Amino acid sequence: MREILSLRQAILATLHYFDLFDWPLTSQEVEDYLYGWSAPQSAISATLAVMKEEVGHVHGFYCLAGREEICELRKERAKISERLWKRVDRFSWIFALCPFVKTVAVCNSLAYGNVKDTSDIDVFIIVENGKLQTAHFFLKVLTQIFRMRVHHDKIAGRFCLSFFVSEKAVNLETLAFPFDPHLAYFAWMMTPIYGEDAYLKFLHANEKWAGRYFRRIPSPRLKRMKKHPVASFFGFIIASFLRIFGGLAEAFFNQVQLHKDQERKKQFSSSLGGILINKDIFKFHEDDPRQRVAEDFMKRLESI
């Protein structure tokens, strides 16, 4: 991993990373997601002010010089993002109703507003140890009932339930490539919508390895957090009933989904790092971009 030697290099590296996704940043976002460095907002603003030949500035957004068109694109995508967040707010109670779910966080494109009309809503879900398949099954059923789950060609505005981990598997370093900035940004940019306690434990569990990419850990993004006391109560009742059967319920739901999961795993076995199914992790990303992003970002770092 190339060493960052100055604030200027750190700013350029950060803008280069987000430029891979056609995404400009505000000065506050530059501070929050500054790659390989740590600096106060005053120093960042002062440095940006003298980087006019390297950095564009439009509508309050910063980007690489010559890429100013993505600033207008961000304004357009912000409108789509707000529509999707309204759907999230409307249906987030489903996660509170589901038994054994500890935390749900919106991740990837919607977490930072970089969405299109065709975008789905990616979520990262932490569940109680030993209950992964049970939670997975109930969430699939509940979101399908309310037509909120990605299913075949029905994608736009629906929840993509493709990343579950148990409480013992919240440290994502076990999934990381030797150079994996995309996974680090994935962890810090997700926005929790349910389950604050488990989310804060998740951040703590990932601080050490993510610190290789960030010198400053961003503040928790809690503004979208919801409690849903009524749904949580009924979720507790369902979980209490299922506990009567001990591990039999988890074994049953595992068997129900095992054949289908294994078939999908074989079908997309070429997806490097994208497919992982075991008792603590369900990660099903048919097109995991991490290796591609790492290679492209490394080339850009070498040019700084």
Image (cartoon, helix red, strand yellow):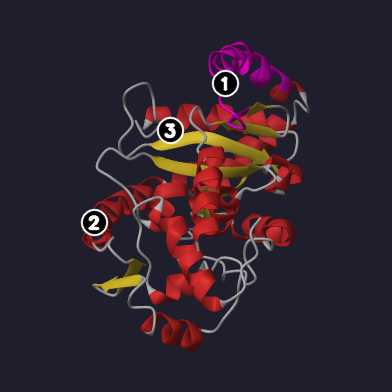
Check if mark 2's residue and mark 3's residue have beta carbons within 8 Å. no
Rounded to the nearest whole Å, what is the CA distance between mark 2 and mark 3?
Answer: 31 Å
Label 2, secondary structure: give it. Answer: helix
Residue range of the region highlighted in magenta in the rendering: 251-275
Residue at 35% over, 49% down: 90
Query: Which sits earlier in the primary sequence, circle 1 or circle 3?
Result: 3
Q: Is residue 161 above or below residue 96?
A: above
User: Quick one: quadrant of the N terminus?
Assistant: bottom right
**Residue at the extreme front of the image, as rendered:** 303
Reading the image, the residue beneath label 2 is 73
Q: Amino acid at mark 3?
A: Thr
The image's mark for residue 143 is 3
Kindly indicate the quadrant of the structure image that contains residue 19: bottom left
Name the spot of residue 30 as percent of width and height, x first. 46, 71
Image location of residue 73, percent across then percent down:
23, 56
Amino acid type of the residue tagged 2 in the rendering: Leu
Residue 13 falls inside the magenta stretch: no
Q: Residues within 10 Å of mark 2 (few under 14, many from 20)?
A: some
Q: Which residue is mark 1?
A: 270
